[in-house]
């Protein structure tokens, strides 16, 4: 079962932080389509107003322009909220290497502000975005929760600290927290622009524009690419999870493994292009291979991802062809 059949209290109120971003806006849309109230909190530093403009006429939707680094904003946003889906953060491993202080401020202090506000306002469930980057240089595949290596970037460190706070807030304060370690999420509304853009939308846009993409490294690095619908399912099922499942982290992926060079040629073929890529230097802080064991999320959250990479990439390409 996906998430469409999940039922919450009739008057349930969801707060999605970072709700104007790629993952956040998709969460807002899914919850609104289910008929529940959504508050979107975003400072629009990386999120985009256009991602949420389509909800403006929905009476169940409220937009709050604000920053999670401000505790008063977090407190106000959590007032009367049942479920918090905390997606607000700055992503990108390379950018975090350039801006470590900013990442600490947003990703650690901001998340802690949200946990504290959720605790004080007696939120039922606090679900937050973590990352597969916390596995660091641990070489064994598939990645299993509890077997992590040395962290390779400030971004990874911020997510690991968030997880530790999540454990403490469940243990000390009884706030049900669930950390979702996302593995290379892709899909509609993911930004293809900028130096730090994710690889799939970036390649799609470049190929559509007949530009020659650059692959960092030899292209033989592998990733567990995860379509956005699977991530929506994980967030909503975490909101239904037991207290016994709280204070823990979960791999959220499909459980597959795709090589970057293969993905490139798949995109090239699907888009009807013949453009050989360039190969550039490896990116600092990058993990070579990534593949998730999702058995823990299946057991504790009832997570059962239905979207394969092949199915998801077709949907993603179709969306970009329509919107770029």
Image (cartoon, helix red, strand yellow):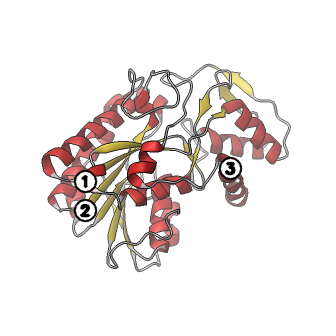
Secondary structure of residue under mark 3? helix
Is 145 or 313 nearer to us in this picture? 145
- 168 left or right, relative to 318: left
Q: Which quarter of the picture shows residue 323? A: bottom right
Image: 203 above or below 302 = above
The disc placed on residue 124 is 2
The residue wearing badge 3 is 313
Residues at circles 1 and 2 in contact by the CB criterion of under 8 Å: yes
Give the label, 3 or 2, closer to the camera. 2
301 relative to 280 in the view: left or right: left
Q: For the view shown, which residue lies furthest in the front direction?
A: 299
Circle 1 Cα neighbour tier, 10 Å, few/some/many (<14 / 14–19 / ≥20): many
Where residue 108 sits: x, y (%)?
28, 39
Q: Secondary structure at mark 1?
A: strand
Residue for badge 1 = 176
Rendered-image quadrant of the C terminus: bottom right
* Depth check, front residue: 57 or 234: 234
Horizontal and vertical percent for residue 10? Answer: 34, 79
- Rate crowding at label 3 as few (under 14), some (14 to 19) or many (20 or more) other CA atoms within 10 Å: many
Q: CA distance from mark 3 to mark 2?
A: 35 Å
Looking at the image, tell me whether mark 3 or mark 2 is earlier in sequence order.
2
- Please name the residue shown 52% across and 62% down the image: 2
Residue at point 35% right, 42% down? 249
């Amino acid at each position: 079962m996906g998430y469409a059949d999940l039922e919450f209290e009739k008057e349930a109120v969801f707060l999605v932080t970072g709700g104007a971003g790629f993952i956040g806006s998709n969460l807002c849309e899914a919850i609104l389509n289910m008929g529940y109230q959504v508050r979107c909190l975003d400072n629009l530093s990386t999120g985009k107003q256009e991602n949420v403009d389509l909800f403006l006429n929905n009476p169940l939707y409220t937009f709050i322009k604000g920053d999670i680094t401000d505790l008063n904003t977090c407190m106000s946003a959590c007032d009367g909220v049942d479920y918090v889906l905390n997606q607000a953060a700055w992503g990108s491993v390379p950018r975090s290497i350039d801006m470590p202080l900013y990442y600490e401020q947003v990703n650690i202090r901001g998340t802690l502000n949200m946990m504290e506000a959720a605790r004080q306002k007696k939120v039922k469930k606090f679900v937050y975005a973590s990352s597969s980057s916390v596995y660091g240089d641990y070489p064994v595949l598939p990645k299993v929760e509890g077997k992590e290596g040395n962290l390779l970037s400030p971004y990874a460190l911020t997510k690991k600290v968030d997880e530790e706070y999540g454990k403490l807030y469940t243990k000390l304060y009884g706030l049900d927290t669930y950390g979702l370690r996302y593995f290379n999420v892709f899909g509609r509304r993911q930004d293809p622009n900028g130096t730090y853009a994710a690889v799939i939308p970036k390649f799609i846009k470049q190929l559509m524009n007949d530009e020659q993409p650059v692959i960092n490294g030899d292209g033989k690095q592998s990733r567990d690419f995860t379509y956005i619908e699977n991530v929506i399912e994980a967030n909503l099922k975490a909101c239904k999870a037991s207290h016994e499942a709280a204070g823990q982290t979960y791999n959220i992926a499909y459980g597959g493994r795709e090589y970057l060079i293969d993905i490139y040629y798949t995109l090239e073929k699907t888009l009807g292009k013949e453009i050989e890529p360039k190969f550039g230097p490896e990116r600092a802080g990058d993990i070579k291979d990534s593949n998730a064991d999702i058995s823990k999320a299946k057991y504790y959250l009832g997570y059962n991802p239905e979207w394969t990479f092949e199915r998801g990439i077709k949907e993603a390409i179709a969306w970009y062809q329509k919107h770029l």
